[in-house]
Image (tube, grey):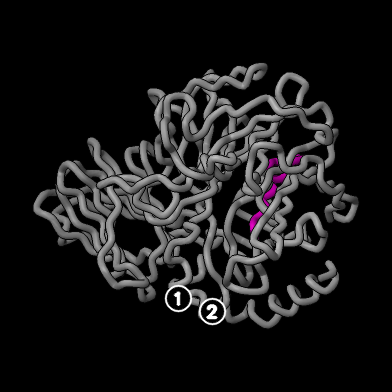
Amino acid sequence: MSEASLLKQTLREVMSGQARASADPHRPAWHLAAPVGLLNDPNGFIQHNGRFHLFYQWNPLACAHGAKFWGHWSSVDLLHWRHEPVALVPCEEYESHGCYSGSAVSDDGTLTLVYTGNVKYPDGARTAFQCLARENAYGEFDKSGPVLALPPGYTGHVRDPKVWRHEGQWYMVLGAQDLRLQGKVLLLRSADLTCWEPVGEIAGSGLNGLGEFGYMWECPDLFALDDTDVLICCPQGLAAQSERYLNTFQAGYFTGKLDYQSGAFPHGEFTELDVGFEFYAPQTTLSDDGRRLLFGWMGIPDGDEFYQPTRQQGWIHTMTCPRELTLRNGKMVQQPARELQQLRGREQEWQGAPQEAPHWDISQAELVIQTGTPFLADLGGALSLQWDGERLTLSRRNLRSGEREHRYWRGDLRELRLLCDHSSVEIFINQGEAVMSSRYFPAQPAQIHFTGQESIALRYWPLSDCVIE
């Protein structure tokens, strides 16, 4: 189908469906969601010429996974966002089944996208091309076509290029599956973004002492924090354990030190980035002021996503809030981007017995809980958070089966920071030592109710809307 035809259909879906989607009581007030249709991975997150750009995987034509477009927002401050022209439309032969995930760089001052063109064949086979597109004077992107075909030794599952510059060279990490159906991360090098040479497999199943560790690794992202290199990735196929790896697929990280010449990347153990119900495909960028910022997709592929009630209103999924990343004692720390504090309304404080706590409206709110003693918090009757002195348990009913399901964190609890937005909550544990992100669908306006035997201290702020132009 031609680009013009696809854009006409997209315009029809947006014009006919946006009012219904916007009126949904579960629609976020300050998280980013697509106008209509399905949103998934954040793509091309970058600060370019003083403005943040966030692209996203988007199917505007249905609440289903299909041939993905790249939607595009931009912002000066992570709070006021502007819809930009649709960046990529899957209309060429080399991207016939979707413009899959990728990244953005500034190449001699030109905003340039590097993405995967996904192609599926009638016999069930598939291939992938890594492609370029460059911004023109109208804020649109002109495609240059493929710059890297499927590398030998891998199946058609090679995708999600993340590109950065190091010591005068461009480098790319790619998610891949080898011919033994083992997940890998590939490293490549280029002088000009066009001609790429392989450096090697830097991580994956069977490498660096991991043993069997998944059949496909998606959405790699490699960057430095202090003097440590961090590899974020999403291994698919990890067996669930009693209290971890409980989602269909995982998103996590390794720390180590990359040898850029040989591709050697000795690293430590895999750590999940978020232990809630919905978090996947994170992508980071380095801001002009030196912060490493992250957006994630508040969703999980191949889970129970299509039972979410927002599909009936013509939209599905949101991004997480933007987060700042640092290392603390060798572990990743995630905290809400400081800009979000500008959304706060009048602060309220309370301390006492949990069951006497105010029943605050958490439809769009920030709440800090300071306690190390056991308590139970009920969020809108649709989600519960319980601390028993040793384990934090987040619980809800599964939308498909109706059965209770749980996610866990263990440690020495000192503080919880909850960021709530109509149908989502992001729980930052001990100033970002761990995070639990989840969607839930309470009746609105949702309130929080506490029970427990010992005193807790609370701080509460209502949050205003982000502005989306």
The answer to whether the residues at label 2 and label 1 have Cβ atoms under 8 Å apart is yes
Q: Which image quarter is the C terminus in? A: bottom right
Give residue 383's position: percent from left, percent from top. Answer: 30, 64
Residue at position x 34%, y 54% from top?
Answer: 460
Q: Secondary structure at mark 2?
A: helix
Residue at position x 23%, y 64% from top?
Answer: 449
Segment tinted magenta in the rendering = 46-57
In the image, 452: left or right of 241? left
Dot 2: within a 10 Å radius of its alpha carbon, few (fewer than 14), some, or many (20 or more) residues? Answer: many
Give residue 64's position: percent from left, percent from top. Answer: 58, 70
Residue 454 visible, this angle: yes
What residue sits right under mark 1 in the picture? 309
Please say if 231 is above or below 279.
Answer: above
Please tell me which residue lies in front, 137 or 260: 260
55 in the magenta segment = yes
Give residue 286's position: percent from left, percent from top. Answer: 63, 34
Please tell me which residue lies in front, 18 or 460: 18
Residue 50 visible, this angle: no
What residue sits right under mark 2 in the picture? 313
Q: Quadrant of residue 191?
A: top right
**Residue type at the position of mark 1:** Pro
Q: Secondary structure at mark 1?
A: helix
238 in the magenta segment = no
Give residue 307's position: percent from left, percent from top. Answer: 43, 73
In the image, 236: left or right of 39? left
